[in-house]
Amino acid sequence: MTDLPEPGSTGSSPAEPSQPVTGQDRPQPAAGAGTAIVRYTVWRIVILVVAWLLLYLLTPLRGVLALAIALVASGVISYFVLDRQREAMGATVGGFFGRLNRRIEEGKRTEDDD
């Protein structure tokens, strides 16, 4: 048990040293969370490479111009084709930062109570 001041007391006891953060205290991603992010990223890269290869093989475009057009085309294609993967990745990232924000708020409340 720790010696915490009673509610309403002045808290004249010396402050305890801060506890180190352990791996259990850190916000953890949901199971399979990294999978959604990796899957979305890999599919974006695949669509970019396919778009660039099609431009390279079917048009006289080369170099930076071909890459720029492939980037734009793959972005448009990804917007429609990868909608489910983007939603899953967004939920994963949002959940992680939501847990992180809750942990920060809990820390603030703990500090305010001290």
Image (cartoon, rainbow, N blue to C red):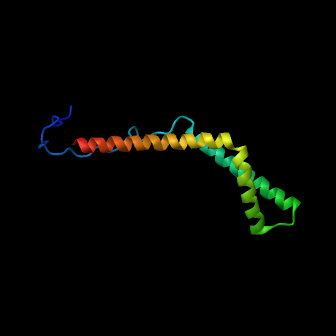
Residues 39 and 97: in front is: 97
Where 68 falls versus 15 (above or below)?
A: below
Q: How many numbered marks appear? A: 0
| 3 to the left or right of 87 | left
In-image side of 84 versus 53 (left or right): left
Q: Residue at x 81, y 67 (%)?
A: 62
x, y percentage for residue 10? Answer: 12, 42
Give the quarter of the image for residue 54.
bottom right
Q: Which residue reaches farthest top?
A: 1
Task: Locate residue 56: give its quadrant.
Answer: bottom right
User: Is residue 48 something one can see in this rendering?
Assistant: no
Return the residue nearer the eye: 51 or 16: 51
Q: Nearer the viewer, residue 10 or 15?
A: 10
Quadrant in which the N terminus appears: top left
The residue sitting at 14% across, 45% down in the picture is 14
Relative image position of residue 109 (x, y in whole percent): 29, 41
State the residue in front, 24 or 4.
Answer: 4
Residue 92: x %, y % from top left = 55, 40
The C terminus lies in quadrant: top left
Residue 11 locus on image (x, y percent): 14, 42
User: Would residue 111 be seen by someone viewing this image from the given angle?
Assistant: yes
